[in-house]
Amino acid sequence: MKLKKGDTVVVIAGKDKGQEGEVVQVFPRTNQVVVNGVNTAKKHSKPSSKNQQGGIIDRDMPVDASNVMLVHKGKPTRVGYQTNADGTKVRVAKTTGEVIG
């Protein structure tokens, strides 16, 4: 998976198309990511020791990784890989060719 926790992404497909947010969680096995403020769902919770109030909570749900695109220097870009001279593998922005992160 080419996305990591902390990356800024923009949604390119679906009901939240055009929204931008930070990747909070990554699920490589299912190829999904949770983006802050995107694909929210209402969850009903009973009062408990953790949440004494209870009620309806907005919760961010996973989005397929194919529906989001990494934002590098303010523009969406595809991500590629390159190996440096010392043998380390780095992520590279396809539009500019610059190393990401």
Image (cartoon, rainbow, N blue to C red):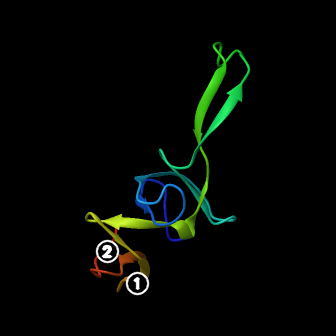
Q: Which amino acid does label 2 sit on?
A: Val
16 vs 61, left or right, is left
Answer yes or no: do the residues labelled 2 and 1 have beta carbons within 8 Å?
Answer: yes
Residue 44 falls in image quadrant: top right
* Quadrant of the frame with the C terminus: bottom left
Instruction: Report which quarter residue 70 is drawn in.
Output: bottom left
Taking the spot 35% from the left edge, 64% from the top edge, the residue there is: 71
Question: Which residue ends up furthest to the front in the rendered image?
Answer: 15
Q: Which element type, helix, strand or loop, lies under badge 2?
A: loop
User: Does residue 97 sit above or below 18 in this rendering?
Assistant: below
Label 2 crowding class (10 Å Cα cut-off): few <14, some 14-19, many 20+? some
Whether residue 96 sits left or right of residue 94 in the image: it is left
Residue 95, given in percent of the width and then of the height, sits at 31, 80
Residue at numbered disc 2: 99
Q: Which mark is residue 74?
A: none
Residue 6 % position (x, y): 43, 53
Task: Rate crowding at label 1 as few (under 14), some (14 to 19) or many (20 or more) other CA atoms within 10 Å.
Answer: few
Q: Is residue 77 above or below residue 41?
A: below
Residue 57 location, x and y as percent?
A: 60, 29
Q: How far apart are marks 2 and 1 (CA)?
A: 9 Å
Name the quadrant containing residue 94: bottom left
Q: Residue at x 46, y 60 (%)?
A: 17
Residue type of the residue flagged with mark 1: Gln
Q: Which residue is drawn at 66% across and 18% down?
A: 54
Residue 88 visible in rendering:
no
- On screen, residue 67 versus residue 62, left or right, reads left
Instruction: Decide which of tag 2 and tag 1 comes sooner along the chain.
Output: 1
Task: Report helix, strand or loop for mark 1.
Answer: strand
Q: Circle 1 is placed at which residue position? A: 82
Q: Nearer the viewer, residue 101 or 69?
A: 69
